[in-house]
Image (cartoon, grey):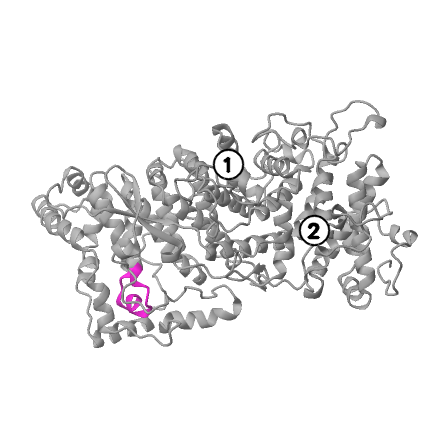
Amino acid sequence: QLFVFLQPVEATDDAFWDQFWADTATSVQDVFALVPAAEIRAVREESPSNLATLCYKAVEKLVQGAESGCHTEKERQIVLNCCRLLTRILPYIFEDPDWRGFFWSTVPGAGRGGGDEDDENARPLAESLLLAVADLLFCPDFTVQSHRKSTVDTAEDIHSIDSCEYIWEAGVGFAHSPQPNYIHDLNRTELLKLLLTCFSEAMYLPPSSDSSNANPWVQFFCSTENRHALPLFTSLLNIVCAYDPVGYGIPYNHLLFSDYREPLVEEAAQVLIVTLDYDSSTSSSPTVDGTTTGTAMDDVDPPGPDNLFVNYLSRIHREEDFQFILKGVARLLSNPLVQTYLPNSAKKIQFHQELLVLFWKLCDFNKKFLFFVLKSSDVLDILVPILYFLNDARADQSRVGLMHIGVFILLLLSGERNFGVRLNKPYSVRVPMDIPVFTGTHADLLIIVFHKIITSGHQRLQPLFDCLLTIVVNVSPYLKSLSMVAANKLLHLLEAFSTTWFLFSAVQNHHLVFFLLEVFNNIIQYQFDGNSNLVYAVIRKRNVFHQLANLPTDSQAIQKGLQRRKKTPEPISRTNSQDGVSMEGSRPAAPAEPGTLKTSLVATPGIDKLTEKSQVSEDGTMRSLEPESLQPLQEGNPPSAVNDGEPWSGEASQPRRDRRRLSSASSSGQWTPTPDWVMSWKSKLPLQTIMRLLQVLVPQVEKICIDKGLTDESEILKFLQHGTLVGLLPVPHPILIRKYQANSGTAMWFRTYMWGVIYLRNVDPPIWYDTDVKLFEIQRV
């Protein structure tokens, strides 16, 4: 009932204000129950001075707690209650534009000295709050183990302690693992929850193309003003990467004791990714292998990003630190998979999306880490969980964001040669997945999962097809031996994408055919020897290539092609893809339960903006190609490709999108295919290598069949294995890799995705629920 106080109350009336934090037996859930949204809004509208005083008093209590070091139980209780109260109130301050500047104003007479206003005393409320929280996160006997054994009299002075000695967990830059303390973990979790709420002002601003407008809360907290920036960054990273949900390596152990570490790990992961929300495309920060975007003449190290968390992340370089991070992330990402074959043996973690964002940031901001990941087959411990999530979420509309981040990570990895090479490792882990059984390599697994996503995912995944095929193109020159199952999947995709109605029904559909032809050309030119399965599949499906070469271009044929649409409603037939039996123990990918909440996402940039082309030279080095020197696929396009900037996730845009896709309207008005347009790209179809291969091999294979009366493919495969096309094929084309490039479009996408995940995952207490967020829409499936 406290909250209904609409008459102004003097700031000096301590007896009144103290009742807000004096209660001893509350939890954050109690505070949320006792302080309803309607009452916070009522005070905000009717009695703004009281709300201002309450915020200022609560911050003052936190500052006092940080000053004194919280030595008594009573002080700790007051700090925690103020923490909970601010967590409850802040979202209602952010949702009102008139209040947004409140925390950045100084409170008159609120100087610590009370009397004369020197500079130190005139800190904005937000800064005092953030610095107090930082101090409290390294407060001996409250959030960290005290190093003194003696009594309270000689308790450590919170201002003289070196917080680097109090890092929460061993790992990067810290070797000592403190004794776990349940109470400290709970207190840290509450403080981090408040910190995350401070940072969440970003949720109340609409998405803007200008991603440089940094979050002032994050900016200040990650600046040199925060003397705990380094130990806090390290504590958050280590707490996440050291977490083992199995419970000391003993299966089923988590059932014996309540795991109080997990809420802290989740909170730490969320705070960490939010502090790393930084648009690397706009900065001239070091490109992290040490070279800068400045000139070679600069002899001093560039300052690097002002955001110290981004700065520290980009400067991690010790092998053992990389090993610790990679092992930790891989262990946590694999946790849901272990669940499938040892049910309940370990606690099932729920924060895999935050981990994927963290992994993305690590690779994006620290190139040395990216190279370390690709240096050994450890990268496959990241790949397999990502493919598992992609396959599992493909039918679920509420997990579109998860599909995107998984694909973005694979796109980033596929730009490096080592990734393609690593994929040749045989796949023996048997994670139950709803895919056909096969024997082969990790490359086969990737192709089979991608085929599944394209042929049996939901409609909203169409913007990802370009990305999926770009990844396959990037790795194709390095794939030594595809299985028959994977080879058939690639040909099934070509068959589906080269039907006339598909090619003529949207302006960019033919790109998918170009990507697939590039895959076949790369494998035939660079990996012919081990790929008899693929060569055999190409020979069997040779009519697809002949049809492409003879694609009709006259108006009548175009119209006729478009008519076929009506007969085949499925974009890609599910039949005849020889799926066979799914793996044992797997469950089919399920759509979202009706009513599941999801958050909308901004559109992602088209593949031409997401990537830049690089050519691989003889010695394996890459050089970036200027766009002019390449014949781009996009020739003959209207200026804007269909799903570029198309809001494809809002419910409202769904029917329109479908109509547009089928009627092939692009944003430049109604679009219809013309003979000139078809000619413009048909003449560039790279069919020469495949036609030459068919010309040489088909007569030989037919001869064997006639001579030996063969219907047995193993004989033909044996022949193809020993065959050679040396000297018969056209000169090999240079290998083109499309490397991911940072751009503000993806930076904004990551911001909306990350905050959407955080919004939906914080349900107990529901910090932002039912407040007026602007960064995304909350929708029900």
Q: Position of residue 664 (x, y in %)?
A: 35, 72
Front residue of 674 and 587:
674
Amino acid under disc 1: Arg
* Residue 661 falls inside the magenta stretch: no
Q: Which mark is residue 255?
A: none
- SS of the residue under disc 1: helix
Q: Position of residue 736 (x, y in %)?
A: 28, 48
Q: Quadrant of residue 593?
A: bottom right
Front residue of 470 and 493:
470
**Which span of residues is magenta-colored?**
496-511
Q: Which residue is mark 1?
A: 315
Q: Quarter holding the N terminus?
A: bottom right
- SS of the residue under disc 2: loop
Going from the N terminus, do you reach mark 1 or mark 2 first? 1
Q: Position of residue 19 (x, y in %)?
A: 88, 51
Q: Which residue is mark 2?
A: 764
Binning the other alpha carbons within 10 Å of mark 1 as few (below 14), some (14 to 19) or many (20 upward) gives some
Residue 392 to residue 298: above or below: below
Binning the other alpha carbons within 10 Å of mark 2 as few (below 14), some (14 to 19) or many (20 upward) gives few
